[in-house]
Image: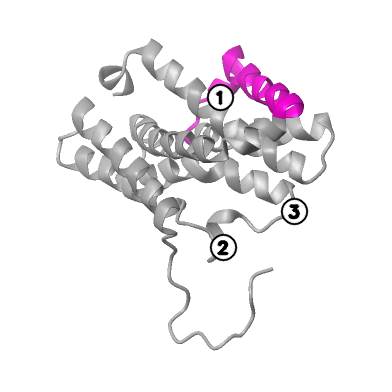
Amino acid sequence: MLQQLFSPSVLHTLDLIGIFVFAISGALLAVRKNFDVFGIAVLAEVTALGGGLFRDLVIGAVPPAAFTDLGYFVTPLLATALVFFLHPHVERIQAGVNVFDAAGLGLFCVVGTIKAHDHGLGLTASACLGLATAVGGGVLRDVLANEVPSLLRWDRDLYAVPAVVGATMVALCIRYDALNSLTSGAAVITAFVLRLFAMRYHWRAPRAWHRRSTAVEE
């Protein structure tokens, strides 16, 4: 189904762009944590490829694309080199990086859902793997950096919710036989725009109803 919606060259290019941007976010966190160059590279690779690796292992698409396409492995290393030498400049364009990160989130939640369904999973499981594809690398990044994953923190702008919306849109389109390049593109754009709005207006998920704890986030 993916090949019917996107040409292989376009899909590959979009994948590499998303991987590069995710890798930058991982490398920047490693710099803030004072990691050495190896640690920066590891965090960049994990952030960029973790979600896709998890999806491919679950659906049995082995060996995963990250191990069969050299570009998938090398792209995070390029991001590592960029951040290693130019991290003060990259930090200054963080807003721009966040925009591309939002675009990668939208793309990966859609592609992940479609790929999971192509391998025989049901709609709900496919949507869940679409979400995992989009946010899994970020979760692994935060765990390795000894931080509470961003998507679990109430004081962070919505990140997983836009991916859930995008993946759900794809699942519904598959259910009603309406998935095509137009509707899949609409799902990508919807997740992308929701994430941009969340960053712009600081949308956050609600905490527990009638929450009595006075604990604050560290």
Q: Position of residue 77 (x, y in %)?
A: 69, 21
Mark 1 packing: few (<14 Cα in 10 Å), some, or many (20+)? some
* Residue 166 located left or right of residue 64: left
Q: Which residue is mark 2?
A: 153
Task: Identify the amino acid type marked 3.
Answer: Asn
Q: Is residue 203 visible?
A: yes
Mark 3 or mark 2, earlier in chain = 3
- Per the image, label 3 sits on a secondary structure element best described as loop
Please tell me which residue lies in front, 9 or 127. Answer: 9
Numbered circle sitting on residue 211: none
Please tell me which residue lies in front, 88 or 170. Answer: 88
Q: Which residue is mark 1?
A: 64
* Residue at (33% x, 44% y) in the render: 193
Question: Does the stretch in magenta take in 36?
Answer: no
Q: Position of residue 141 (x, y in %)?
A: 66, 44
The residue segment tinted magenta is 59-86
Q: Residue furthest right?
A: 36
Task: Identify the amino acid type marked 1.
Answer: Pro
* Residue at (30% x, 37% y) in the render: 189
